[in-house]
Amino acid sequence: SKRHPQSKVFYPWYRRALSACYQLMIRKLFHVDVTDTQVGMKLFRKEVIHSVLPYLKIDRYGFDLEVLTFAKAMGYDKFLEAPIQLDYFLNQNRFILKDLWHVAKVGRSLMRDMFRLYFRLRVMRQTLPQFQVAADSKSARTGSR
């Protein structure tokens, strides 16, 4: 996580601001308790990936968010964040306008993926079989259907 207290992160103020706004939206819309969903490297237990993978549809920037959202929805709600070292200023030849264009382009794709996921989960109310199985087993125990 870029926001871990031990992380060493050096990148422009406008990227920090955009990242903070995006993470705020993530927390409000998806209730995922992760401070940095887009840092890049993630490790998962095998059973989490096997549970989540069949339901994933996003194959670009929103993939990370989709995995974390579905994992949480399926009951895997313990996330551990580790520190990173990020030096965005390594490429000094990059012009700020070129960088802003790149950020805008990626940002549009990221936002599109985020809203597609939100639409699937909140508007279309996509359900996951694990919840149906849990509900069926509970009703079977009580004898009601």
Image (cartoon, rainbow, N blue to C red):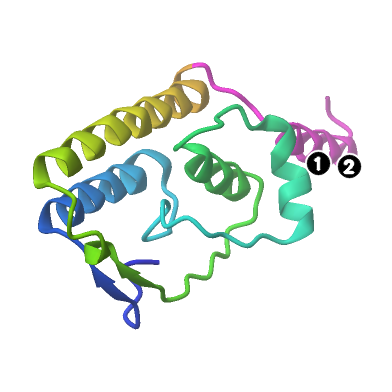
Residue located beneath label 1 in the image: 138
Label 1 sits on a secondary structure element that is helix
Percent position of residue 136, x then y: 82, 33
Which secondary structure lies at badge 2?
A: helix
**Depth order, front residue of 134/106:** 106
Q: Quadrant of the C terminus?
A: top right
**Rendered view: 40 above or below 84:** above
Mark 1, Cα crowd under 10 Å, few <14 / some 14-19 / many 20+, is few
Compared with 136, 112 (above or below) is above
- Residue drawn at 58 percent across, 65 percent down: 78
Which is the main secondary structure of the residues drawn in magenta?
helix
In magenta segment, residue 133:
yes
CB-based contact (under 8 Å), mark 1 and mark 2 = yes
Q: Position of residue 34 (x, y in %)?
A: 42, 59
Identify residue for label 2: 141
Q: Using residue 25 as the reference point, say whether residue 31 is left or right of it.
A: right
Image coordinates for residue 73, horizontal then vertical, percent: 59, 44
Residue 108 in percent (x, y) is at: 29, 28
Magenta-colored span:
124-145
At horizontal 78% and vertical 41% (from top left) the residue drawn is: 134
Give the position of the N terminus as an image quadrant: bottom left
Question: Dot 2: within a 10 Å radius of its alpha carbon, few (fewer than 14), some, or many (20 or more) residues?
Answer: few
